[in-house]
Amino acid sequence: MDTQNPKTVPTIDNSIGMLAALIGDGRSLLALVALGLVLSGIFALFLSATGTFLPHDLSFLGMEPRTLCDLHQCRIVHFIFHDRVSFGGTLLAIGTLYLWLVAFPLRLGEEWAWWTLLLSGIVGFLNFLTYLIYGYLDSWHGVATAGLLPLFLGGIWKTHGLLPAQRKGWRSLLQPGMPIELTTRMGFGRICLLFVGAGMALAGSVITILGSTVVFVPQDITYLGFTPAQLNAINLHLVPLIAHDRAGFGGGLACCGLTVLLIVWKTRPTLALWQALLAGGIMGFGCAIGVHYPMHYLIVSHLAPAWAGAAIYATGIICLFPSSADRNHREDTLNKNHQKQREKPLSSPKTTHLFQYKVLRRGL
């Protein structure tokens, strides 16, 4: 019998119900929200790629897509789907970043990660209420929101128990996770991503407001070949339908930008974070920019901001890549902290626990 390496037999708490066991600390609920966003993004891209309108869209319009497509080289239909592709890309990016937040900083009880999820989620879910302005209630969007919102609220409530006993609240977002040094490669990369994140949040807010009210910018009118009055003459429900897509994309963009901004501001670059930011950038910018080319919406003043943002974001991603030297430096720092702690007696088990938490936090 091997007595040197005894195996620990896991115990089961028979008083815990199945639902409580599945929910656990609440991260599983937030992970489901993230996966739901990813699936919704894929669904939006699939519908756009196949040129499929949802049944309630057709019911609201009261006309067939073929009739719309006969007008001005099908540009009205293409314009509707270009917003939906862009919206799908933002959902994919948000879902990816949420998965990273749940799997890494929130698992360690990082308070800023909880607040990032809460604030970005508020922005995303409140965007649904913009239908009160433009007057089109997307029933499928409503069902998806009604399905994800309880999961989100339950996950936020349960994961609050992961946070440290001494909490800073929203003030945990105020101080950067590490000094921003413009003279270093990684510092410059963070500056680039912070700039793009703030720009996305601002642009998304503007698009939401304009999309719910004015709906079109001058470049849109040039591409469509119709004024809002002419579109109303074709079908009184066209502009509200387009406004719904515009506002939805704007809300998604604002939510995504806020998430990127807070993540880059608060955390130290790691390989997993770099991968999440890379994937989110490819999906977000790829959809928002790429959709314009097959539909021939190539007005320079319309595409220039997106291309500029993509270029700055790509620069930040390249600079933020954690090289082997960076990883070795973090490991050396972690080992030195461990060594110092062994040499310095601690006053209480509580102090030991606090030190271990801080070491884990710095090692990320």
Image: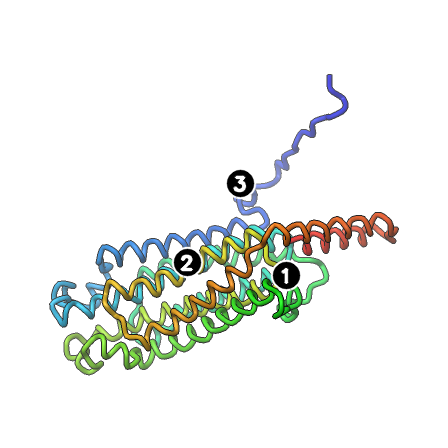
Residue flagged by tag 1: what amino acid is it? Glu
What residue is shown with label 1?
Answer: 111
Judge from the rendering whether residue 289 lies leftward or rightward of residue 186; answer left or right: left
Q: Which residue reaches farthest top? A: 1
Q: Height in image: 2 above or below 125?
A: above
Question: Element at badge 1?
Answer: helix
Which residue lies under the disc numbered 3? 18
- Residue 35 in sight: yes
- The residue that disc 2 covers is 282
Report the front residue among 33 and 321. Answer: 321
> In terms of secondary structure, where does tag 2 sit?
helix
Nearest to N terminus: mark 3 or mark 2:
3
Dot 3 falls on a residue whose secondary structure is helix
Distance from label 3 to label 2 (Cα)?
Answer: 39 Å
Would residue 30 be seen by someone viewing this image from the given angle?
A: no
Q: Residues within 10 Å of mark 1 (few under 14, many from 20)?
A: many
Contact, mark 2 vs mark 1 (Cβ under 8 Å): no
Query: Looking at the image, which is closer to me, 305 or 344?
Result: 305
